[in-house]
Amino acid sequence: MKYMTRRQALRLAGCATAAIPLTALLGRETLAEDLPQLDPEDDTAKAVAYVHASENPEQLCSNCHLYTGEADSEWGPCAIFPEKAVNAIGWYKSWVKKTV
Ligand code: SF4
């Protein structure tokens, strides 16, 4: 039976520790569809005049560069509202056209 040297054990522990945040991020990505929907009455949402339905069909959350939801999803994450999902047809005054 081959035993690990102390150096090998420490190296393995370091790799395992470094892998934890990556795993957490991957898990968070998987759960994006399960995020609670942003409430327009939320103080932060009100402060930026977020609405669930844009009045301008050319300016939607789904084509904003801060929206990271899937192209065909009704709701998705936005960098401005962590841990919440915004409506794909939503909007607020800091909308910026997606370039990619
Ligand atoms: S920044 Fe505003 S407009 Fe852009 S996706 Fe987020 S909520 Fe929608």
Image (tube, helix red, strand yellow):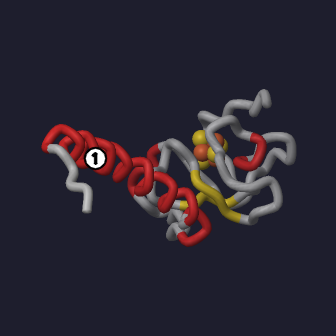
> Which quadrant of the figure contains the C terminus?
top right
Q: Residue at x 38, y 48 (%)?
A: 19
- Above or below, 72 relative to 46: below
Badge 1 element: helix
Q: Nearer the viewer, residue 73 or 27?
A: 27
Q: In terms of depth relative to the viewer, which is nearer, 75 or 94?
A: 75
Q: Nearer the viewer, residue 63 or 59?
A: 63
Who's the residue at 23% across and 48% down the image? 13
Look at mark 1 in the image and give the residue it sits on.
Answer: 12
Q: Is residue 83 above or below residue 8?
A: below
Q: Please state if 94 lies on the left or on the right of 36 as rendered.
A: right
For the N terminus, give its image quadrant.
Answer: bottom left
At which x and y percent is residue 74? 74, 65
Determine if the C-beta at disc 1 is less than 8 A from ligand 1: no
Q: Which residue is at the far top?
A: 99
Give, as a three-letter code, the residue at label 1: Leu
Q: Does residue 97 appear to the left or right of 76 in the view shown?
A: right
Q: Where 29 sits versus 99, above or below?
A: below
Q: Residue furthest right?
A: 57
Task: Residue 45: give x, y in percent of width and height.
Answer: 48, 52
Q: Residue at 75% of width from left, 49% of height from top?
A: 62
Q: Position of residue 31 (x, y in %)?
A: 54, 66
Question: For the residue carrying disc 1, how many other residues have a C-alpha within 10 Å: few (<14), some (14-19), or many (20+)?
Answer: few
- Quadrant of the image where one finds ligand 1: top right
Q: Residue furthest front?
A: 1
In the rendered image of this protein, does residue 49 appear above or below residue 2?
above
